[in-house]
Image: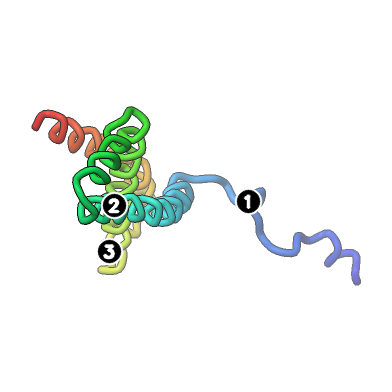
Amino acid sequence: MSEMSQNRPLSPHLQVYKFIPTMAMSIIHRITGGAMYFGTILVAWWLIAAASGKEYFDWVNGIYGSWFGLIVLFAYTWVLIHHMLGGLRHFMWDLGYGFDKHFTTKLAKALPVASVLLTVVIWLIVLAV
């Protein structure tokens, strides 16, 4: 091998790229997509419990109503909202809008704030009912 090819990295890696908000949102979008599988299992468990009888349903509701269960359900709500907003961002791009560098950065910074605020609003409504 030549000396020049030995000094080059084999492929670009994280140390080559500057970590920017759009990169973070791309990573978080993938993570929330994976987390939705876990949350869907929780929803399926709840539905199975509802179809299995009152005692089992009450037991599952007790788990979901515990402090730990409520934290998990709050996190799952955030995952759904965040992934949905990220999906709407991608849909907008599919339609050919929002490619300006400054706009995408602003959108990437607004996405976590909006997802947290919407999650809190949803939970405040649910808890008020």
Please name the residue shown 27% across and 56% down the image.
48
Q: Is residue 58 left or right of residue 128?
A: right
Please name the residue shown 21% across and 56% down the image.
51
Q: Which residue is mark 2?
A: 43
Residue type for callout 1: Leu
Please name the residue shown 31% across and 40% down the image.
73
| Residue 129 vs residue 119, the one in the foreground | 129
Distance of label 3 from label 1 (alpha carbons) = 27 Å
Q: Looking at the picture, how far across and down is residue 40, in whole percent?
A: 33, 55
Residue type for callout 3: Phe
Q: Which residue is mark 1?
A: 14
The tag earlier along the polypeptide, 3 or 2, is 2
Tag of residue 91: 3
Q: Nearer the viewer, mark 3 or mark 2?
A: 2
Q: Quadrant of the N terminus?
A: bottom right
Number of on-image labels: 3
